[in-house]
Image (cartoon, rainbow, N blue to C red):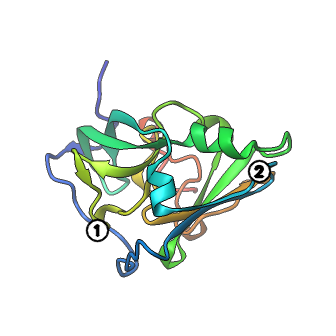
Amino acid sequence: MQRIPPNQHLTTDFPVLHFVRVPEFDRKTWDFRAEGLVENPVRLTYDEFLALERTGDVSDFHCVTGWSRFDMRWEGVRFSDIANLVKPGNNARFATIVSDGGYMTSLPLDELMESDVLFAYNFEGKPLEPVHGGPLRLVVPKKYAYKSAKWVRRIVFTEELELGFWEQRGYSNSADPWKEERYSY
């Protein structure tokens, strides 16, 4: 099976691409919230988040600008573990991921519940650098990287899909690199 999607090129670098200034991280005031259509909304400090069950995963990463990198080693908390903690209601079909700096994206819950979707805080055995999304980044390996939101602070479980930052600007909401779903035209 081919590992590189159509019209992507392989890199060994981890290019830095983002639209806003890298937010400041203050461990004492940082929090993570999971809310919306859930039975048990939560607010966690950074240390409380780090105390959740840790999972490692190795996955490939594909950027909509055309580069791919293989075998990236992430550590963090599975999205499904957060969902199990907050217990989404039956009418929750999507989740909107909200980040520092005004970024957001939205994905169907069934895609987010896959075992390789993580809220990552470590990369290659070290704390995730702020330029790559630290202290917390969503990693969705089966999507273009703009669905892997950097600087995550909140999840809102919703009934409807919301258009995220790049999706409002013409990028595909499904973002499947194997189908080259880069744009929404």
On the question of residue 167 being in view, the answer is no
Residue at 29% across, 28% down: 3
- Which three-letter amino acid code belongs to the residue tagged 2? Asn
In which quadrant of the rendered view does residue 34 lie? bottom right
Residue at 60% across, 44% down: 82
- Which three-letter amino acid code belongs to the residue tagged 1? Val
Residue at 45% across, 34% down: 116
- The residue carrying pointer 2 sits among few (fewer than 14), some (14 to 19) or many (20 or more) residues within 10 Å by Cα, namely some
Q: Secondary structure at mark 1?
A: helix
Q: Which mark is residue 40?
A: 2
The number of numbered badges drawn on the structure is 2
Residue at 26% across, 63% down: 129
- Image-based side of 81 in relation to 149, left or right: right
Which of these two is toward me, 116 or 81? 81
For residue 110, above or below residue 47:
above
- The residue carrying pointer 1 sits among few (fewer than 14), some (14 to 19) or many (20 or more) residues within 10 Å by Cα, namely some
Q: Quick one: label 1 or label 2, which is nearer the N terminus? A: 2
In which quadrant of the rendered view does residue 172 lie? bottom right
Q: Quadrant of the N terminus?
A: top left
Q: Quadrant of the C terminus?
A: bottom right
Which of these two is toward me, 156 or 146? 156
Image position, residue 159 (x, y; %): 81, 51
Mark 1 to mark 2: distance in Å? 32 Å
For residue 30, above or below residue 89:
below
Image position, residue 47 (x, y; %): 45, 59
Tag 1 near tag 2, CB within 8 Å? no
Image position, residue 100 (x, y; %): 50, 74
The residue that label 1 is drawn on is: 131
Nearest-to-viewer mark from 1 and 2: 2
- Image-based side of 161 in relation to 77, left or right: right
